[in-house]
């Protein structure tokens, strides 16, 4: 039983890279044979140090140490077979292989420790992303939603772009924004804005009042935590939307944020009329200074929200990403498929690396299908089964045909 458990544990700990151990083992065997056949005049034993160095590229410290020990043993066997074991040159060669193998093992240990640290940092970053930038629901009210977030910094999962969506009485409110700057430096301000929106969206009855509340939150944060040397520079662009459950007229307020794209059937792409107010954090504005712009959002339409990182993405030749033109290719796709195509196409345009954080939200209004009342459905099905007669009486279990059913 213990042998079986040990075999199972060994099999589970085996990694795909372990199969590459054949290469250093074969190298040790080959060098050993060639050195013995070449005689005392040609010394190939020092090349054995290549084996542990090669193992370090794909194996851990334990296996690298094993390969290093085999290399030292092979060199010892070679010089003993050639009868030069007690010479000073042989001692130096064996010692050199042993020292270099030991250094290689220490390198593996340091690499694994750094790998564990990076994995822990990534775990914390993923947890922070879940806390700050909540995943958007696939369905909310009559809307179907999909989102895309691409941070500019390699080690960051979140940055200065932000979005949120929440249900309010009679509809849905959406926020998408972009903090000046990118990556980790903008996370604090993004967190403040997200928290303020999630709270104020349920307290303010109109979009201008909501925008004014967000302005006050951003201004307070800048007053308390504004970095030195950046006075007056930080700001946040934001777009607030209100989509009613009934009717096709939505409303939006822009705080320096670009307008959304409205995708319709047949590759139709339009830009709703927008009168933007200044970005948040530039100056304290009252609700009267935030315009509200209506837009038509009917069943089957898709609203595409985005940040500057999308439309300002450049290829190697300096050309901007043709966002509206590319989005027109997938106007009939679901939000999930649309976002998938945009992600792949955008990364292909920039060569796999963005210069700024980028976020996209696709929102489609689904036609509301009226479900028949359960009583009516039962009457209909029962009427089909029972044939002629009074369907209402049969559904209640009374009347002619009830006992036959």
Image (cartoon, rainbow, N blue to C red):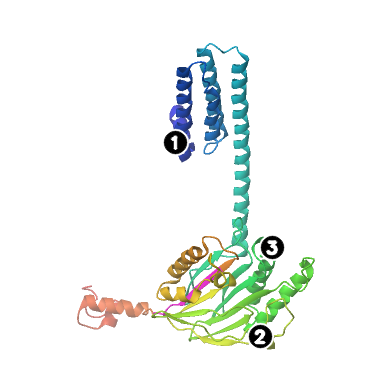
Where, by quadrant of the figure, is residue 213 drawn? bottom right
Q: Do the residues labelled 2 and 3 touch (CB within 8 Å)?
A: no
The residue positioned 64% from the left and 79% from the top of the image is: 256
Specify which label sits upstream in the sequence, 2 or 1: 1
**2 vs 3, front mark:** 3
**2 vs 1, front mark:** 1
Disc 2 to disc 1, how far (Cα)?
64 Å
Closer to us: 21 or 264: 21
Find numbered disc 1 in the image and state the secondary structure of the residue it sits on.
helix
Q: Which mark is residue 353?
A: none
Disc 1 to disc 3, how far (Cα)?
43 Å
Instruction: Report the span colored magenta.
Output: 359-369
Disc 1 crowd rating (10 Å Cα; few below 14, some 14-19, many 20+) is few
Q: Do the residues labelled 2 and 1 touch (CB within 8 Å)?
A: no
Q: Residue 335: where, in percent of width, then height?
A: 45, 71
Disc 2 to disc 3, how far (Cα)?
28 Å
Q: Residue 239: where, in percent of width, then height?
A: 60, 78
Label 1, on which residue? 19
Residue 368 within the magenta-colored segment of the rendering: yes
Q: Is residue 1 visible?
A: no
Label 2, on which residue? 290
Q: In which quarter of the image is the N terminus?
A: top left
Q: Quadrant of the C terminus?
A: bottom left
Image height of 72 relative to 328, above or below? above
Closer to us: 64 or 79: 79
Q: Can residue 299 be seen in this view?
A: yes
Label 3, on which residue? 185
Disc 2 crowd rating (10 Å Cα; few below 14, some 14-19, many 20+) is many
Find numbered disc 2 in the image and state the secondary structure of the residue it sits on.
loop
Where, by quadrant of the figure, is residue 113 drawn? top right
Specify which label sits upstream in the sequence, 2 or 3: 3
Where, by quadrant of the figure, is residue 182 drawn? bottom right
């Amino acid at each position: 039983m213990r042998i079986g458990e040990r075999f199972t544990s060994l099999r589970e700990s085996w990694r795909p890279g372990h199969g590459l151990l054949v290469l250093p083992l074969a190298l040790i065997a080959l060098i050993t044979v060639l050195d013995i056949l070449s005689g005392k005049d040609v010394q190939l034993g020092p090349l054995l140090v290549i084996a542990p160095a090669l193992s370090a590229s794909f194996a851990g410290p334990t296996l690298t140490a094993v390969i290093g020990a085999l290399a030292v043993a092979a060199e010892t066997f070679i010089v003993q077979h050639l009868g030069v074991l007690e010479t000073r040159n042989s001692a130096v060669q064996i010692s050199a292989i042993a020292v270099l193998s030991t250094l290689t093992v220490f390198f593996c240990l340091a690499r694994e420790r750094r790998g564990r640290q990076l994995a822990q940092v990534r775990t914390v970053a993923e947890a922070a992303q879940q806390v700050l930038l909540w995943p958007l629901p696939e369905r909310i009210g009559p809307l179907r939603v999909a989102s895309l977030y691409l941070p500019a910094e390699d080690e960051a999962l979140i940055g200065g772009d932000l979005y949120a969506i929440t249900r309010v009485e009679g509809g849905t409110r959406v926020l998408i924004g972009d903090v000046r700057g990118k990556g980790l430096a903008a996370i604090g301000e993004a967190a403040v804005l997200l928290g303020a929106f999630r709270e104020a969206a349920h307290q303010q009855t109109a979009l201008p009042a909501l925008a004014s509340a967000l302005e006050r939150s951003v201004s307070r944060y800048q007053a308390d935590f504004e970095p030195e040397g950046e006075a007056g520079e930080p700001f946040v662009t934001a777009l607030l939307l209100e989509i009613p459950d009934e009717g096709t007229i939505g409303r939006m307020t822009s705080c320096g944020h670009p307008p959304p794209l409205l995708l319709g059937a047949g590759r139709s792409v339009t830009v709703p009329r927008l009168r933007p107010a200044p970005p948040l954090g530039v100056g304290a504005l009252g609700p009267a200074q935030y315009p509200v712009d209506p837009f038509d959002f009917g069943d089957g339409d898709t609203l595409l929200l985005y940040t500057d990182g999308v439309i300002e993405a450049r290829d190697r030749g300096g050309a901007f990403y043709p966002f509206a033109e590319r989005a027109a290719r997938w106007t009939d796709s679901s939000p999930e498929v649309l976002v998938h195509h945009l992600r792949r196409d955008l990364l292909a345009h920039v060569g796999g690396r963005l210069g700024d954080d980028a976020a996209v939200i696709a929102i489609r209004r689904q036609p509301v299908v009226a479900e028949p009342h359960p009583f009516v459905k039962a009457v209909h099905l029962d009427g089909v089964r029972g044939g002629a007669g009074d369907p209402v009486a049969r559904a209640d279990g009374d009347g002619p045909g009830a006992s036959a059913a």
